[in-house]
Amino acid sequence: MTIVEPDSLKEVYVMSGVAELPFNFPVAQSKDLLVYLYDTVLGDESVLIEDTDYTFDQTDPSFPTTGSITILDTAVYENTELQVTITRDTELVQEYDMEFEQDMNPVQLEFEQDRQCMMAQDMVEADRNSVRFPPSEKVENSDNILPTKAVRANSLLGFDENGDFSVSEDLLDEAVDKAVEQGTAEAEGYANSASASASASEASAQDSLDYALQAQTAQAGAELAETNVNNVINNASINEINFFLGSRVDSTATLTYGGRV
């Protein structure tokens, strides 16, 4: 068959209760397929195993074709927090042995050519997913080789003022110093915020206490006023005063006072 450049060598599915997941790029055999399970909450990623975690189904096993996988665990494909990624990594082997004066099998020859093309596509895909230097920059071979493990131990990989990457203990020390400085500043900020909050709470508590004292004073005044009113009422009852208005024969008005103390 012909192998065209695929739109993508990766299928990503968020689990939603569907167990069968198709892939739209050709594979030569099931072991060329890589299936990853990703937990979107915890950030954990693991590799799923064929016939243990999923089964593989191909449109036509006689030559590279598309197909699908079926997730076996219900707890996986019904968990919406999980994500399954299907990709291809064609095995880098050539198993077809052609001997002198042997009748060539065109089907097998085309199968191997297909695999060679898919190997190249897989390598390009891996290259695109790698950290690379821009095409416009000329990078000498010695510029992009890391130092040995012993040399780069306890160091940090970074970029200098020229944009060239380097492995240096100084970069690590600077990063640590900046982290400590930032952490100290943040801690001081949190402490100041806590102090201000405590002061505000204290002022609020004092205001509440003042309001309570004022309320008590007002209540006492009200009680005193009530007492005074009652006293006036009682005194008025005790010191009752009566006035009588009368008249004489000569039409002279008379005012008679009568009462008790």
Image: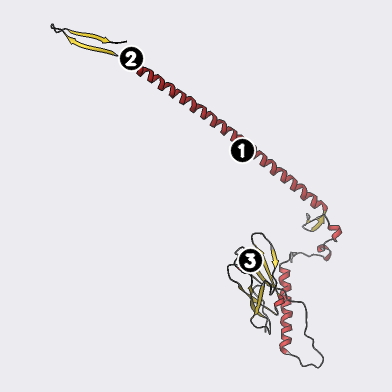
User: How dense is the environment of label 2, judged by Cα within 10 Å: few (below 14), some, or many (20 and up)?
Assistant: few
Which comes before the other along the chain, label 2 or label 1?
Answer: 1
Which quadrant of the figure has residue 73? bottom right
Left or right position of 234 against 123: left
Looking at the image, do the residues carrying marks 2 and 1 touch, with CB atoms under 8 Å apart?
no
Which numbered circle lies on residue 112? none
Q: Nearer the viewer, mark 2 or mark 1?
A: 2
Cα gap from disc 3 to disc 2, whole angstroms: 95 Å
Q: Residue at x 70, y 66 (%)?
A: 46
Q: Which mark is residue 197?
A: 1
> What residue lies at 49% left-to-right and 26% top-to-bottom?
216
| The C terminus - image quarter | top left
Q: Which is more toward the observer, 58 or 25?
A: 58
Q: Label 3 sits on what residue type?
A: Gln
Q: Quadrant of the N terminus?
A: bottom right
**Residue wearing tag 3:** 83
According to the picture, the residue beneath numbered tag 2 turns out to be 238
The residue positioned farthest toward the left in the image shown: 249
Callout 2 secondary element: helix
- Quarter of the image for residue 13 reads bottom right
Q: Of label 1 and label 3, which has the lower sequence position? A: 3
Are the two marked residues, 3 and 2, in contact with CB atoms closer than 8 angstroms? no
Answer above or below: position of 104 versus 180.
below
User: Residue 235: horizontal and vertical position, in percent?
Assistant: 35, 15
Give the spatial CA distance, label 1 vs label 3: 44 Å
* Image position, residue 191 (x, y; %): 67, 39
**Circle 1 SS class:** helix
